[in-house]
Image: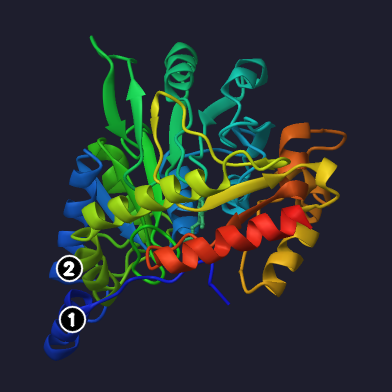
Amino acid sequence: MIPVNEPVIGESELANVTECIRTGWISSAGRFIDAFEEGWASYCDRTHGVAVANGTVALRLAVAALDLQPGDEVIMPTFTIISCAAAVIDCGAVPVLVDADPETFGMNVTQVAAKITPRTRVIMPVHLYGHPVDMDPLLALAAEHHLAVIEDAAEAHGAEYLTSFGRSAPTWRRCGSFGDVSVFSFYANKLITTGEGGMLVTDSDTIAARARSLRNLCFQPTRRFYHEELGFNFRLTNLQAAVGVAQLARMPEVLKQKRWMGQAYGERLAGIPGLQIPMTKPWARHVFWMYGLVVDESTGLDAVSFAGRLAAKGVETRPFFLGMHEQPVLQQRGLFAGEHYPVAERLARQGLYLPSGVALTPTQLDAVCLAVREVLAA
Ligand SMILES: Cc1ncc(COP(=O)(O)O)c(C=O)c1O
């Protein structure tokens, strides 16, 4: 079976982890934590990095650091991972949804303005599958209505967006550089990984200090075991950061591999009737975190049957997200009653992604494309 993802971990990761074990710095202090935070923040052109245990808690920490209150509203895409809604609900705030863009699968930014109410506090764009969200209209709305932006760049390491907002000339900026707070995941299927891991990046000294405190149970620097606020243990270990530091050095080759993959899949799969392949907007530099396909209903297939036929040919896939408004656990809470988002609903039923890891070989990619063609020709 050709796997959906396989990480590339090598000698430099091993050397760094070995150093942690030899020196005993295996917990959440140590030189690799600082180096990873500084390195990743600087890669994203941010002032501060706060490393945490995973991307889900990075979102939770972002929401907590912005002091979201019960009843506050956060506008987010329905087509995303549940971590986004969970972070908001966990602090008593309310997720408010918009549909997906049918071409990029990211949030439909034209629907955001209509969802702003006096209770709106945050807009949460999520860059999906490696393609950036159209940030300029969102940044303009956020500025106009005094809203914070929590940018979820978990799937968009190194992706870039051509922004004019606040600039005298259009400028390419990396995803993760746009939010008041921006978050990443370093799960094993991400462009760079620490196994499990995440990071919050920001330019705000206040948000960074608050996130650091909340990450570490709100311990006081001067008086140990004295707490004025409830925090979390969301710490990343030095062992994980040791992997992260070595992975960060791989970013240029990872991006090269991902762009080769995006182009090679595109060349081989373009023009197949009934198959939608990823596109790249002129204002975007895609990193193809995962190479997603949408199979048309006219083929007689949906994502489940398409995945089953590909699996029978030795190709592993994963389905697209199921929208937040279709999640039983959220509906049971009385959320999103009667709401429909047709683009997200279709993506959930007809979309899946192909093997897309950094270890994917040209031979594997050719075999995947042959399998896709055979399934759709049958
Ligand atoms: C867009 C997005 N946000 C957040 C997360 C959560 O990250 P983690 O799996 O590290 O908790 C993911 C996970 O893959 C994700 O895809």
State left or right for residue 7 relative to residue 290. left
Query: In front here: 169 or 361?
Result: 361
The amino acid pointed to by label 1 is Trp
Along the line of sight, the residue nearer the viewer: 249 or 99 = 249
Residue 155, visible in the rendered structure: no
Tell me where residue 120 appears, x and y as whole percent.
Answer: 58, 25
Residue plotted at (33% across, 55% down): 257
**Residue 203, image x and y in percent?**
25, 36
- State if disc 1 and disc 2 touch (CB < 8 Å): yes
Give me the residue at 77% from left, 40% from top: 346
Residue depicted at x 17% and y 52%: 38
Which residue bears the numbered disc 1? Answer: 25
Write down the residue under mark 2: 32
Q: Is residue 249 visible?
A: yes
Residue 33 to residue 210: above or below: below
- Calculate the distance from the C-alpha at mark 2 to the C-alpha at mark 1: 9 Å
Pick the residue in front: 351 or 79. 351
Quadrant of image for the N terminus:
bottom right
- In the picture, measured across the screen, residue 123 lies left or right of residue 198, that is right
Percent position of residue 287, x then y: 39, 45
